[in-house]
Each structure stands twice: as C-alpha cells, then as structure tokens.
Image (cartoon, grey):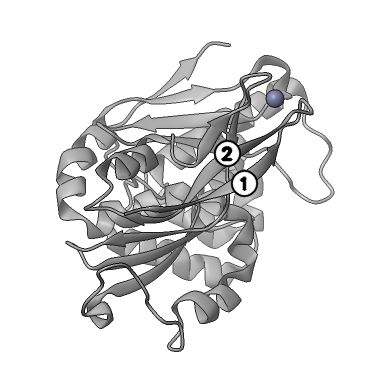
Amino acid sequence: MALKAAYEIRCVCGAAFAADSYEYVFAEHDPHLRDAILSGEFNRAACPSCGRGLPVGNRFLYRDEKNRLWVWVCGKEEEPKRAELMEELIGKDAVIEGHFLDHGEDYRKFLVFGRIGLIGLLLEEDRALRRSEGKRLRERPALRWIPEGGEDPAYLFLAGNKVRVAMPLKSPEEPGSLPASAGERKRWLQWYSRGLNLHNPCSSFLNRRMRKGWNRIRQEEGACGGGDEFEDFAGSWAAYRMNAKRFRERCPERSAFFDGLKGLKVSRQVRSLRP
Ligand SMILES: [Zn+2]
C-alpha cells in the first residue's frame, strides 16, 4: 500500500549507499509504518560502514482514513517556505490523489514540518492516539541530555507508549551578547529544556486559551526570541529564568505572561541523563 523510492545517501564518514524512503503512508494499511513514525525509526537508515543512523528522503504524505486526515509532512528546513508550500500542496488547486480513494473531498488537509509536527497534529486529531499516549506523555519524566563540552547537540526526550521524540535544545543567540561560558551555556540549556517541557508540539501544558495568549504576544511584541512558537517559548523562558530583570526590560509582555504561569500544574519532571 505504501509507496517508496530509492535514495542515494552519502554519510559524513564518506560512505555512499542506497536506501528506501517511504513517500506515502496509509495509516490503516501500514500500521507498522505508523508505529515507526511514532517511534522515530521511519525513513531512517544505518550507514553500512560506520553504523550512524541517517534520515532518508524528505517529504511524505500521511493518510488517515478513519480520522479523514490528509497530511503533507515536509522537512523542518522547509518551514520558511510555508506559504508557498501551502499553495502548492494543499491549496484549492492541489489535487488529492490516492489509492482506493473515494470521497477525497471529505479529507481535511494539513501541512506540517518534521515528524514531531506530524505527531503533534495526530495527538490533536486522532482521539484513539491521544487516549493511548496523552497521559503517559504527560506523566513520564522527560530526559535531558547535555553533553560535557557542549559540542554535540543537546536534547530533551519525551516518551509515551509508542511515541518517542527528541527535541533539540538551542543555545542563546542574543545579538551583540558575549559568548556564554561553558557553565552559563549549560545553565541556559537546562532552563531551555524546562521551557520546552512546558510547551512543545507533542505534549504542552498550556491550554488553548494560554496558547492563544502566547501567540498574540508573539505577534504584538515581535522578535524577542527566534524560531517557531515552541522555540520562542523555550528560549524566552531560559532568558527569563537566567535574568528576570533584563528579560522584563527587553520583553515586558512575555515576562508578564511567564509571571502568570507561576501556578501552572506540570506533571512531567525533567531528569538529567549524565554524559
Ligand atoms: Zn557512515
């Protein structure tokens, strides 16, 4: 049922090899692929020479008949082209074509970026998945990985029953600021991970009203932190916890919003994985 194509992969170790990439997943007919998407093994291949896990391919289409979802999943790096991709892939002229597809017009069409974007959407739109994963995701501790020396990327890991996600932690990037010392950078990443734990695409503790408020502030106050709404939240949270006074001067609305989150109930702890 699923469609795949062969890709030529070049690993950083220099080895080149061919691997298959799925370009179309039909959730009801390919449950193993759906599980692989949730767990992170989807469209990845191991380099036969050095064993590194590498992503294969780019966009794919996810079709869920039960929930009538038709989702284009683009690469995270394509996000700046959102408007054009909307037009091209799910605009009114975009044609839905699929195998054994009747009543294609009943489907709701979405565009998301990256696997985590898809999981976030499914947790909202697929009630069975939300029932089976939501509670676990909220209660199991998130694990934080910050390598010593800070060369490798740092991550926050979330796990449900089937869902596994690794979300990158981003270093401070205030224009004109001095490069942070290793200790400061580590503290920043720790606060960043706590911000990401509060609000991330898969399992946020902000309710609908709070999330609306946050996005309104992002529009009104402009670029205090960069990235999408989650990266902005985590980066702003880190800046707020590192130096509340300075953050309040720079981003008063965000600061007041965070002050208002003091009593927020967060059932998921963040635990550190020691390098
Ligand atoms: Zn390799």
Amino acid tagged 2: Ala
Q: Quadrant of ligand 1?
A: top right
Q: Is residue 52 above or below residue 273?
A: below
Q: 80 and 74: which one is in front?
A: 74
The outermost residue toward the bottom is 93
Q: Quadrant of residue 100?
A: bottom left
Q: CA distance from mark 2 to mark 1?
A: 5 Å
Q: Which secondary structure, mark 2?
A: strand
Disc 2 marks which residue? 19
Q: Earlier in the sequence, mark 2 or mark 1?
A: 1
Location of the C terminus (image quadrant): top right
Compared across the picture, whether 223 is left or right of 253 comes to: right
| Residue 180 coordinates in the image, percent (x, y) | 77, 31
Q: Which residue is mark 1?
A: 7
Q: Position of residue 185 (x, y in %)?
A: 69, 28
**Farthest top residue?**
274
Are there few (<14), some (14-19), or many (20+) residues within 10 Å of tag 1? Answer: few
| Residue plotted at (33% across, 52% down) | 206
Amino acid residing under circle 1: Tyr
Q: Quadrant of the N terminus?
A: bottom left
Residue 152 disc label? none
Please report the residue visible at 31 percent of the width from the left and 31 percent of the height from the top. Answer: 268
Residue 211: horizontal and vertical position, in percent? 37, 60
Residue at disc 1, CB closer than 8 Å to ligand 1: no
Looking at the rendered structure, the number of numbered marks drawn on it comes to 2
Are discs 2 and 1 less than 8 Å apart at CB? yes
- Above or below residue 19? Residue 249 is below
Tell which of 138 and 220 is nearer to you: 138
Report if residue 263 is visible in the image.
no
Examine the rendering and report whether any part of residue 269 can be seen.
Answer: yes
Front-lying residue, 210 or 55: 55
SS of the residue under disc 1:
strand
